[in-house]
Amino acid sequence: MGGVATDAKFHVLAVDDSLIDRTLIERLLKTSSYQVTAVDSGNKALEFLGLQDAEGRHSDLVNVSTNSHDQESSSLKDIPVVIMSSENIPSRINSCLEQGAEEFFLKPVKQADVNKLRPHLLRGKAKELFNHKKDVMGECLPLERTRTRHNGFEVVQ
C-alpha cells in the first residue's frame, strides 16, 4: 500500500474533447491514485496552467517580460506529455515522440497504458528536485568544475 500513497502526489491534466474518452482516462487515473483534472480543450488546459485567460489572451505571467516567459517555459518543460489518439498512423506517432512526447497511447486507453506513466512522472519529479537543489546550490560551486549531462541529469565534476 506504500506505493499507492506515493502516487497520490502526482497531478495529471487530462485533455480530450470527447466526454467518453475524458471520463475513461479520468477514471483509470483515479483508480491508480493520481489526482486528476480533466478539461475538454487545449484552451482550457492553458487556462488551468495559468498561461491564458478565459478570453484566450496570454496571461499576465507570460506577458510581463521575455524573462518571465523563459522562467514559465523552463518550469513547464519537465512536465511529461503523453499523447492519446485513436489514429494509428506510424508517422504521426513517431513525430509526436520525436517532438518530446514521453508516450503515445492508442484509444481506448487501458489500465496497462496508465501504468506506463509512473516512471515518467517519477523521472519528472527527480528532475524537478535536482534542478531545485542545483539552483539553490549553484552559487556555492567552484567555477572551475565542469558540467556534463548523464541520463538527462546535469552532473558537476
Image: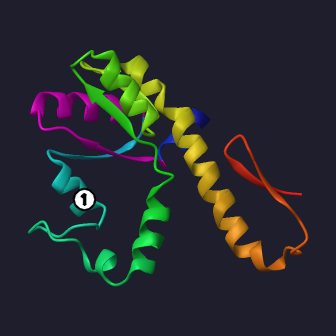
Residue 52's quadrant in the figure? bottom left
Q: Residue at x 89, y 75 (%)?
A: 142
**Residue 98 at x, y = what percent?**
45, 33
Indicate the quadrant containing the N terminus: top left, top right, bottom left or bottom right: top right
Q: Secondary structure at mark 1?
A: helix
> On screen, 125 above or below 96?
below
Foreground residue, 109 or 88? Answer: 88
Residue indicated by mark 1: 46
Of residues 74 and 32, the one drawn nearer to the viewer in this rendering:
74
**Horizontal side, residue 154 vs residue 99: left or right:** right
Residue 86, given in percent of the width and then of the height, sits at: 21, 20
Q: Which residues are magenta?
A: 9-32
Residue at 65% over, 62% down? 131
Residue drawn at x 35%, y 24% as measured from the top left? 93
Q: Quadrant of the C terminus?
A: bottom right
Q: Amino acid at mark 1?
A: Leu
Picture coordinates of residue 96 (x, y %)?
A: 37, 32
